[in-house]
Amino acid sequence: MDNRKKPGIIKRILALLGVFALLLLVILTLVFAVTGNPNFFGMLLITLMAPILLWVYAFIYKLVRGKSAEEMAEEEIERKKNAPDK
């Protein structure tokens, strides 16, 4: 396996874990609402705030970093294409 492909696989695995975590939050919130659990409003708050905080984190990361990883990868590919052969 090529080392350049590993970050892509890791990103996919982390994204799937994030999706499962958000689905679990939604399901637990629904269960808490149906059963009348007193922790329902806490779960509702977490369910609403988690995606918002993740978006804010990603937005600030892009602002601080300057360019997205995709843009940097595209520039690297263009640089390799335009580089003179040895």
Image: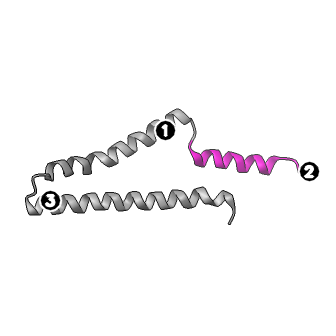
Under mark 1, the amino acid is Tyr
Location of the N terminus by quadrant is bottom right
Kind of element beneath mark 1: helix
| Boundaries of the magenta span | 68-86
Q: Depth check: give the residue in front, 75 or 13.
A: 13
Crowd tier of the residue under label 1, counting other residues whose Cα lies within 10 Å: few below 14, some 14–19, many 20 or above: few
Q: Residue furthest left?
A: 36
Residue 72 in the image, given as x and y percentages of width and height:
64, 44
Earlier residue among tags 1 and 2: 1
According to the image, label 2 marks what residue? 86
Residue corresponding to mark 1: 61
Q: What element carries label 3?
A: helix
Q: What element carries label 2?
A: loop
Q: Which of marks 3 and 2 is nearer the N terminus?
A: 3
* Left or right: 25 in relation to 2: left
Mark 1–mark 2 distance (CA, rounded to whole Å): 37 Å
Vertical arrangement, residue 84 with respect to residue 30, above or below: above
What residue do we see at 73% from left, 48% from top? 78
Say whether marks 3 and 1 touch (CB < 8 Å): no
Q: Does the magenta stretch include residue 27?
A: no
Discs 3/2, front: 3
Find residue 79 and report its horizontal and vertical position in percent.
Answer: 76, 46
How far apart in space, not on screen, are marks 3 and 2 (Cα)? 65 Å
